[in-house]
Amino acid sequence: MKISKYLWLLSGSILIFTSNGKWMIPISIWITLICLLRFVRFSKPWTGFISVLTISFLSNIFIWKGFIPLPSPLYYIVSFIGGVFFSIPFLIERLLIVRVKSYIQTIIFPSLFTLFSYLYTLISPSGTFGSIAYSQSNIVLIQIVSVAGIWGIIFVLGWTASTVNYLLDNYRNRQKAYFSAGVYAFITGLIVIYGFRSNIRF
């Protein structure tokens, strides 16, 4: 279990550097969230939080270098604050997940992740600049912005991570696995259909 846990952490730690900013690869943030959420679920709450915070802080320092014109002390402070808002949803989800055993648990992380992404824009002088929503370039997916704003993209990213983790936790329970996979497939299917139709109209 410990070896597996740290493999999840290692994978997430590597991919987070290509999740946004100067080395951005759209698929990276999807896998990063899955890996880090998996690691946190295997870890003690505060251990997981500090680990994700450290990784997020370090990645922010490197991936936004040259993009954010701030003097060094302030640049590091902003990078740290961004890491805090990125990491808090992992901590809260870890604390709540032990109390929620039903499929509802898949909604906890994406809801928190979207909420704290929004809260960060309220205190950030740059607004939504640097949001992970902008890491996505799939024309079908980003059509959801016309309905739910960039928060729709962020929610889908978080929901994918929590759904994959739910499936990994419950793959032996066919009823739970089929239900969660079915709900995810249905909702994402609607998003894809809407994206295609909107793109064709455009």
Image: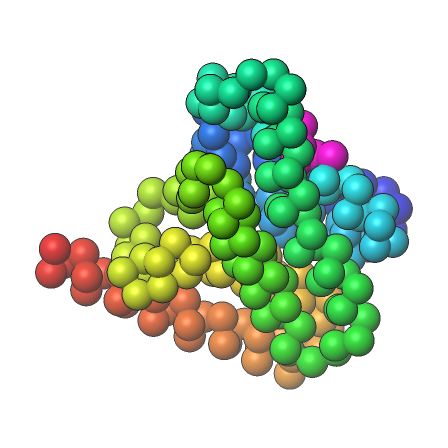
Residue projecting furthest to the left: 201
Measuring from the top left, give residue 33's x and y in whole percent.
Answer: 61, 49
Q: Vertically, is 122 above or below 14?
A: below
Q: Based on the picture, tell me whether residue 181 belongs to the magenta stretch.
A: no
Q: What's the residue at 74%, 77% (across, down)?
A: 100
Measuring from the top left, give residue 13's x and y in whole percent.
Answer: 68, 34
Q: Vertically, is 97 above or below 20?
A: below
Using the rendered view, name the quadrant where residue 161 is placed: bottom right
Measuring from the top left, give residue 109's x and y in whole percent.
Answer: 63, 62
- Residue 115 in view (yes/no): yes
Q: What's the residue at 60%, 39% (across, down)?
A: 82
Q: What's the residue at 85%, 46% (across, down)?
A: 47
Q: Is residue 151 left or right of residue 96?
A: left
Q: What span is in magenta?
A: 54-58
Query: What secondary structure is the magenta-colored segment mainly?
Result: helix
Q: Nearer the viewer, residue 95 or 70?
A: 70
Measuring from the top left, give residue 90's x and y in whole percent.
Answer: 70, 54
Q: Is residue 48 left or right of residue 88?
A: right
Q: Nearer the viewer, residue 35 or 68?
A: 68
